[in-house]
Image (cartoon, rainbow, N blue to C red):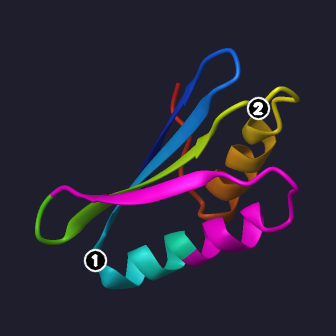
Amino acid sequence: MDAQVRSEEKFSKLSIAYEGKEEGTIVCSTIDAITAKYSIQPESYICNISDDKNVVVVEYQDDIDRVAGTIFEEIIKTLKIEVTK
């Protein structure tokens, strides 16, 4: 699994690439559980990259209070995705 975050003024997007059905279930259930705790709700969708690889995208628009960053950090930490700089 790996993740990428993109952020602009009121827009934030988290993309998480995963492989296989098992990882997909873990990623999607984690995202659902964490985003459900917050009043601001994202748009999300899954893109197929290849037979076994997919990317789930979580987008927040009109994120005036910039809550998305906190949510993304919690998702990445829960999924134990290593952050590289």
Residue at the top extreme, as displayed: 9
1 vs 2, front mark: 2
The location of residue 35, given as percent across then percent down, is 74, 61
- Residue designated by label 1: 20
Name, please, the residue furthest toward the front: 62
Residue 69 shown left or right of residue 79 in the figure: right
Element type at mark 1: helix
Magenta part of the protein: which range?
Answer: 29-49
Q: Amino acid at mark 2?
A: Asp
- Residue 35 falls within the magenta-colored stretch: yes
Q: From this viewpoint, which residue is outermost toward the left?
A: 51
**Measuring 78% from the left and 68% from the top, which residue is drawn there?**
36
Describe residue 51's horizontal placement relative to residue 54 as left or right: left
Query: Callout 2: few (<14), some (14-19), or many (20+) C-alpha neighbours within 10 Å?
Result: some
Relative to 27, does residue 56 appear above or below in the rendering? above
Q: Is residue 73 shown in magenta?
A: no
How many residues crowd mark 1 within 10 Å: few (<14), some (14–19), many (20+)? few
Q: Residue at label 2? A: 63
Q: Residue at x 86, y 58 (%)?
A: 38
Which quarter of the figure is the N terminus placed in? bottom left
